[in-house]
Amino acid sequence: MTSPLSIVLFSGTEDKLHAAATLAAGAAAMGRPVNILLQYWALDAFRTGQIGKGHRLACEAEPGAPADAASLPWVETLRMAKELGEVQIRACAGSLDYLKLDVSELDALVDSAGGIASFFADAGDGSITFI
């Protein structure tokens, strides 16, 4: 069995969303299972009314850098990754509680809500990337 790539996506900035989507698509194309855990500010980017809209860049980005510089929007890259392979996107239950959100308020790209223990169980011996 191929080891999974697990991504903790904490940030909701355009550049970091794109990086996570690109990693997920690359791993899925290589046949690796992908687990993405959405925490805190990443959850906002996945709200039904917010997904696909431009999000600011990280504070370390150059002033004046275009927020839409990616050749393919991150949300489309994630959709493509899900078509390519086994990509599971889970909203962190603790973050949902903290932000007073329900998983039903998130886009259909989000498969479920769950806790840290289930995320680590899915990660197994695979690598975990924090973005």
Image (spheres, rainbow, N blue to C red):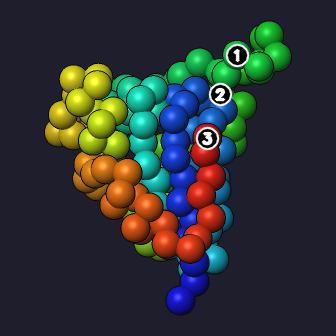
Residue 105 at least partly seen: yes
Choose mark 1 or mark 2, whichever is in front: 1
Amino acid at circle 1: Cys
Q: Which residue is mark 1?
A: 59
Graded by Cα atoms within 10 Å as few (under 14), some (14 to 19) or many (20 or more), the crowding at tag 3 reads some
The kind of secondary structure element at disc 1 is: loop
Q: Is residue 38 left or right of residue 125?
A: left
Q: Is residue 100 above or below residue 28?
A: above
First in sequence, mark 3 or 2: give its number: 2
Q: Is residue 109 left or right of residue 3?
A: left
Graded by Cα atoms within 10 Å as few (under 14), some (14 to 19) or many (20 or more), the crowding at tag 2 reads some
Q: Is residue 59 above or below residue 111?
A: above
Q: Which residue is mark 2?
A: 68
Tag 3–tag 2 contact (CB < 8 Å): no
Residue at the spot 67% in from the left edge and 22% down from the top edge: 58
Residue 127 location in percent, x, y? Answer: 62, 64
Q: CA distance from mark 3 to mark 1?
A: 14 Å
The kind of secondary structure element at disc 3 is: loop
Q: Locate the C terminus and report the quarter of the image it occupies.
A: top right
The kind of secondary structure element at disc 2 is: loop
Amino acid at circle 2: Asp
First in sequence, mark 3 or 1: give its number: 1
Give the number of the disc on residue 131.
3
Residue 115 location in percent, x, y? Answer: 31, 50
Give the number of the disc on residue 129.
none
Outermost residue, front direction? 117
Q: CA distance from mark 3 to mark 2?
A: 19 Å
First in sequence, mark 1 or 2: give its number: 1
Residue 110 at least partly seen: no
Tag 1–tag 2 contact (CB < 8 Å): no
Q: Is residue 7 left or right of residue 93?
A: right
Residue at the spot 33% in from the left edge and 33% down from the top edge: 95
